[in-house]
Image (tube, rainbow, N blue to C red):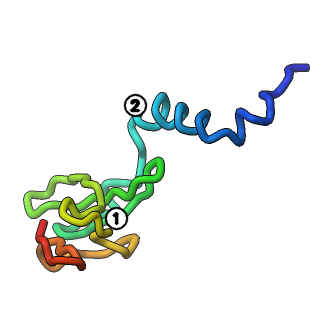
Amino acid sequence: MERTLYRHFYLADHVFEAERERIFYREWFCGGREADLPTPGDFAVFDVAGESVVVVRTQGGALVGHYNVCRHRGARLITDCRGALAGTIRCPYHSWTY
């Protein structure tokens, strides 16, 4: 019978950080299906290895992903999990627009 990993491999923060760096940050992450965002302005917010990412359908029909954080003050831009934007994304803190 194979031995399991020692307890600290499951609980140690430095092991988790190494796994994030070597696994999650180097691979693609599937957040959903393209068909889930059919219309320009549709968006979905995902947690990817502790970071909030928003994926939006553009006016041109492309899907683009961005950190869900304002570059100015670090405020969370979108708090809903899914929805549709009327136009731009506006920071709730100082109204920076994306």
Looking at the image, tell me whether mark 1 or mark 2 is earlier in sequence order: 2
- Residue 41: where, in percent of width, then height? 19, 70
Q: Is residue 85 visible?
A: yes
Q: How many residues crowd mark 1 within 10 Å: few (<14), some (14–19), many (20+)?
A: many
The residue indicated by pointer 2 is 26
Residue 2, picture quadrant: top right
The answer to which of 46 and 61 lies nearer the viewer is: 46
| Camera-nearest label, 1 or 2 | 2
Dot 2 lies on which element? loop
The answer to which of 36 and 72 lies nearer the viewer is: 72
Question: What amino acid is at disc 2?
Answer: Arg
Is residue 29 left or right of 40 when viewed as pictured? right
State the separation of the CA atoms marked 1 and 2: 22 Å
Residue 8 higher or lower than 37, as above or below: above
Q: Residue at x 91, y 20 (%)?
A: 1
Question: What amino acid is at disc 1?
Answer: Ala
Q: Which mark is residue 72?
A: none
Q: Residue furthest left?
A: 60
Q: Which mark is residue 44?
A: 1
Is residue 14 left or right of 51 when viewed as pictured? right
Q: Residue at x 71, y 39 (%)?
A: 10
Q: Residue at x 78, y 28 (%)?
A: 5
- Residue 57: where, in percent of width, then height? 20, 61
Q: How many residues crowd mark 2 within 10 Å: few (<14), some (14–19), many (20+)?
A: few
Is residue 14 left or right of 40 when viewed as pictured? right
Q: Is residue 38 visible?
A: no
Residue 78, picture quadrant: bottom left
Dot 1 lies on which element? strand
- Residue 62: where, in percent of width, then height? 16, 53
Residue 4 higher or lower than 46, as above or below: above
* Tally of marks: 2
